[in-house]
Image (cartoon, helix red, strand yellow):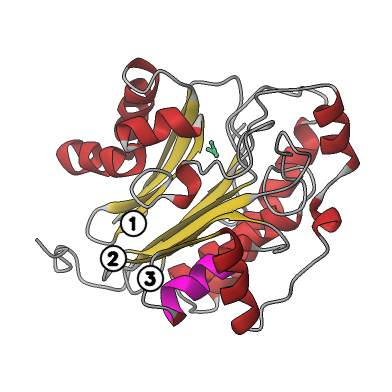
Amino acid sequence: MPPQRDRVPAPRVPSIIVHGGAGADPVEGRDELRAGVRVAVLEGWRVLAGGGSALGAVERAVRALEDHPRFNAGRGSVLTSAGTVETDASIMEGDRLQCGAVAAVSRIANPVTLARRVMEASRHILLVGEGALAFARAQGLPECDPEALVTERQRVRHRELVAATKGTVGAVALDRHGTIAAATSTGGLAGKLPGRVGDSALIGCGTYAESSTGGVSCTGDGEAIIRVVLARRALDYLQQADDADYAARVAVDLLVEEGRGHGGLILLDWRGRTGWAHSTPLMPVALMSAAFTEPRVPF
Ligand code: GLY
């Protein structure tokens, strides 16, 4: 059934929520994470406040997090078992269920922008590896030296075999026309096999948006998230309960109990109400809306 768009007339109150990944609490590094998600939510907010689209807002917010070396996406991504960076990203616009994604991509500093190009300039949804890179070249997107994405922090963690780093990033936004968009980007799982693809590249698992219901971006154990198709399931809970916080909590319970993994998610409903939940010690979150004077960074 196509999404129902006539429940409430536009205009809506624009809102955006971002996350910096579910994982361990670094305690001393909290301020840096707080500042990072705050900047990202403001970047996305500027797009919405200027009358721009939810799609533009989530792309802008996720790009800011990909550029920040402290998050596991773009520059700062964790390394594969071969010591390389391979990123996954996806983006979705919830009016017409348009979506695009890339997986196992190296040499691209902002995979979320490549995912958007796949959505808007190809007839496909998911491109991987060398094919995604060839498409990026054809689109004139800048390519970078793969070493430019590797930070000293991740090199050290790789040497020390830190296995379960999380820190995927994501954003969900509602614009004044009532359109919801969501995006997710990640370096994946530390020490993963080259070629491994996680939930962040898979529509319905790491990312989903349906303007009549809401949008979701997930973070955490990719295999567990895929097992329960977490993003779509979270929207099903939202549809049933009409309560964003409750839907987020029930979805994370599903991730833990049936997915047999840990992580979290952010959620924004069709009225601009936000919800988030995580089973890990920490998940940096920031939100901004026309109803606030300042971004909220509630962690
Ligand atoms: N959730 C990110 C990943 O597992 O790849």
Residue in view at x 47 percent, y 72 percent: 118
Q: Nearer the viewer, residue 267 or 150?
A: 150
Mark 2 or mark 3: which comes first in sequence?
2
Confirm or reject: label 3 Cβ below 8 Å from ligand 1. Answer: no
Q: State the residue at coordinates (32%, 23%).
A: 254
| Secondary-structure class at tag 1 | strand
Residue, disc 1: 209
Identity of the amino acid at label 1? Answer: Ala
Reading the image, the residue beneath label 3 is: 124
User: Which residue type does callout 3 highlight?
Assistant: His
- Apparent side of residue 47 relative to residue 271 in the rendered image (left or right): right
Residue at the spot 51% in from the left edge and 29% down from the top edge: 221
Indicate the amino acid at tag 2.
Leu
Determine whether 61 is above or below 245 in the image: below
Cα separation between marks 2 and 3? 13 Å
Q: How many marks?
A: 3
Using the image, tell me which numbered label, if any, was put on residue 97.
Answer: 2
Q: Nearer the viewer, residue 14 or 83?
A: 83
> Where is the N terminus found, in terms of image quarters?
bottom left
Going by the picture, which residue comes out furthest to the left? Answer: 1
Question: Which residue lies at the image location 20% right of the left edge and 71% below the top edge?
Answer: 9
Q: What is the span of residues highlighted in magenta in the rendered image?
A: 113-120
Label 2 crowding class (10 Å Cα cut-off): few <14, some 14-19, many 20+?
some
